[in-house]
Image (cartoon, rainbow, N blue to C red):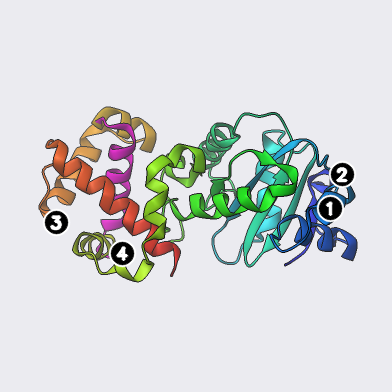
Amino acid sequence: MGDVLPLSAARNTDRVANASETAALEVVLSRREPIADRCRALRRLGLAPEASLRVIGVSTVPGRDPAAATIALMAQKRLTRSAHVGVVGGVVAVLFQQGTASPSGVLRAALRQCNRDKRVATGIRVGVGGLIGGPDAEISWDQALIALRFTCPRDKSGEIGDPGYTVVDYDSLGVLATLAEVSPERLQREPDVMALDALAATENGALDVCALEAFCLTGSLRQAAQVLYLHHSTVASRLERVEKAMGWQLGDPAHRFKAQFALLARRLACAAT
C-alpha cells in the first residue's frame, strides 16, 4: 500500500505520511486482521470505530497523481472532514465518516463542473462503497472496487465520458453487481463487446460510443444532448452511426437493453486491461 494522506493536509499534497498512518490504513482495509486491531487502527486515523463509515475508490488517467487529484476533488465539495486517503495498487481508497448519504451525487456534480471548466480533475473515475460498520471497512472497499469496474472506460485520448457513468454507487447496482462475477476474458469475447471496441477505435468512434452511453443513461435524445453539451441533432447523428455499426434499432426496447448490457460488459472487460 502507498502513502496515506489525511484530507486535512489538502493544502500540502506533497506531505509524506508517516509509517504509523500507512500501517493503520492497511489494517483497517484488511480482512485478515482481528476486529480489535482494526478498531485501534481506526482510532489512530482519527475515526470512530463505533460509527459507520464509507470507502470510495478513485482511479485517474495515467501520469496523474491519484491522491492529489482525489484530494482536490473532495476538497472542492467539502467532503474532507474525518477522511483519509491511501493509494492501494494504483487505486485511491478514501475512508470517511460524514453523514449517511452517499456522496455519489455530490462527486458527480463536481466532476461535471470540472469537465465543463476543463479543469485538471477530468479523467477521474469513482466507485462508491456502501455504508458499513467501521471494523468491516474492507466490505465497503470491496464494493467500491466493484463499482469502479462499472465506470466508463477511457478513450484513446485518456478522456472519460459523462460523469453519470464516471461515478458509480455500489448500492445502485443491485443485481447488476453479479455481472462482475463473470471473468473479463469471457466478456471480452462477446461479439457485441468486440464490435463496440472496434467502433470506438475508428475515427470519431469513441464519441459515438460516448453518445450511446449518455442515451442509455438518460433514455432521451434531448437529455443525452444536454448531458454532453451538444445539439440534439449531433447526438442523433452519432447514434445513427452506432445503429449502423452494431445492427441495432435503439427505438426498440429489446435493442436498447442489449446496448445497455453490452456497454456494462465492455466496462467490466476494459477494467481488467
Spatial separation of the CA atoms under disc 4 and disc 1: 40 Å
> What residue sits 31% from the left and 28% below the top?
223
Indicate whether residue 202 is drawn in magenta: yes
Q: Are marks 4 and 3 in contact (CB under 8 Å)?
A: no
Q: 138 or 261, which is in the foreground?
A: 138
Residue 226 percent across, percent down from the top left: 35, 30
What amino acid type is highlighted by mark number 2?
Answer: Gly
Indicate whether residue 90 is drawn in magenta: no
Helix, strand or loop at label 4? It is helix
Q: Which mark is residue 36?
A: 1
Residue at which label 2 appears: 46
Residue at which label 4 appears: 187
Spatial separation of the CA atoms under disc 1 and disc 3: 57 Å
What amino acid type is highlighted by mark number 4?
Answer: Leu
Spatial separation of the CA atoms under disc 2 and disc 3: 54 Å
Looking at the image, tell me whether mark 4 or mark 3 is earlier in sequence order. 4
Q: Which residues are magenta?
A: 201-220
What amino acid type is highlighted by mark number 1?
Answer: Ala
Spatial separation of the CA atoms under disc 1 and disc 2: 16 Å
Residue at which label 3 appears: 245
